Amino acid sequence: MTASGPPYQRIAADLRRRITGGELAPGDRLPSTRQIARDWNVALATATKVLALLHAEGLVTAQPRVGTVVAGGPVAATGSGAGADSGGGNGADSGGRQPRTGTEHELTRQRVVRAGIEIADAEGLDGLSMRGVAARLGVSTMSPYRYVDGKEHLIVLMADEAYGEEGYPDSQPPDWRARLELVGRTLWRLHRRHPWLAQVTPLTRPLPLPHLAAHADRSLAALDGLGFDATEMLDRQVLLYAHIQGLAMHLESEARAAAASGLSDEQWLERQGPAMDAIVTSGRYPAFGRVLSTLAETGYDLDLDGLFELGLRYLLDGIAADSARRRGGVAG
């Protein structure tokens, strides 16, 4: 790392050298913003600018649920990384703004929102900042504020945009169960694609998101006619969403834990081995110990997709049985 230039340029130059020199190959994961902040002893905002600069140069790309990785296509080395910043000291004007790249006149709310989604997909909501969005877009720090009021407003717009990425065909499946399955799997795909969504819409404080309301409308339409009143219909719609959101929370928390600890799932479990063995062999928890002892031989893969399908089936089976009792027959 050279001794001159602002911290974000020096860190970017070090990572750039590792990429162009082949130390980091296409597809390799770069340090997260938290790792950069910790390893180089800089602020999160500085770490965000590092990845934004490399992204603007085409050296890296955001990969959902993985993070920022080295881009797969050929890239051109950019030297020391001073670029437009050379001759300007720290690359910012007297107001602390980053140099414009000619895209400010093309800036729209849609571009700001999509840039926020890209950052959140790669780094989580903790890695999202208005400064980082501006850096990714190559515009001055205050430019995004012309389109959004701040980070909280941006997150709401991001969530609505994400929920609107998938819609439904005009032709409905023939029965209520297939219609609810379609809604459930659509929402699960969206949360899989954007794990941070699970943090945005708490059940007790729902946000008025039109695109999320579209999914709720499909759920309630499927439940209509099964013998439930309005409260009971909404309860079951909330349970469906809570099942999806509850599992999706683990996608985001796992990514955050991996970034903070630097350990893979396997490495983390290996470290917990002795303490878990002590619990299993203590004799105080016989059923738990018996199951884990069996799984020590056969293995267990915590498959969130499989758990989603299992929970969805149990939920729909319960709705079918409840509807049948209310209508005095067999629910379809």
Image (cartoon, rainbow, N blue to C red):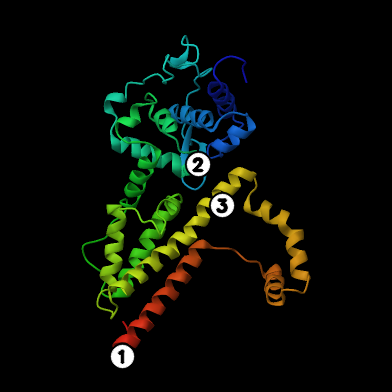
What is the CA distance from the residue labelled 1 to the residue labelled 3?
45 Å
Amino acid at the residue labelled 2 = Asp
- The residue at the far front in this view is 204
Identify the residue position indicated by label 1 in the image.
328
- SS class, disc 1: loop
Which of label 1 and label 3 is nearer to you?
1
Crowd rating for badge 1 (residues with CA inside 10 Å; few <14, some 14–19, many 20+):
few
Q: Upstream in the sequence, badge 1 or badge 2?
A: 2
Task: Give the residue at x 76% y 64%.
Answer: 277
Identify the residue position indicated by label 2 in the image.
126
Q: Is residue 169 above or below residue 177?
A: above
Crowd rating for badge 2 (residues with CA inside 10 Å; few <14, some 14–19, many 20+):
few
Identify the residue position indicated by label 3 in the image.
254
Task: Give the residue at x 55% y 48%.
Answer: 255
Crowd rating for badge 3 (residues with CA inside 10 Å; few <14, some 14–19, many 20+):
some
Amino acid at the residue labelled 1 = Gly
- The residue at the far top in this view is 87
Q: Quadrant of the C terminus?
A: bottom left
Amino acid at the residue labelled 3 = Glu
Q: Is residue 83 above or below residue 27?
A: above
Task: Give the residue at x 54% y 33%.
Answer: 44
Tell me, for residue 180, which label it has, or none. none
The quarter of the displayed image where residue 134 is located? top left
What is the CA distance from the residue labelled 2 to the residue labelled 3?
13 Å
Q: Upstream in the sequence, badge 2 or badge 3?
A: 2
Task: Give the residue at x 37% y 64%.
Answer: 184
- SS class, disc 2: helix
Residue 256 position in % (x across, y down): 56, 47
Residue 38 position in % (x across, y down): 62, 34
What is the CA distance from the residue labelled 1 to the residue labelled 2?
51 Å
Q: Is residue 8 above or below residue 161?
A: above
In the image shown, does 170 or 50 lie closer to the viewer? Answer: 50
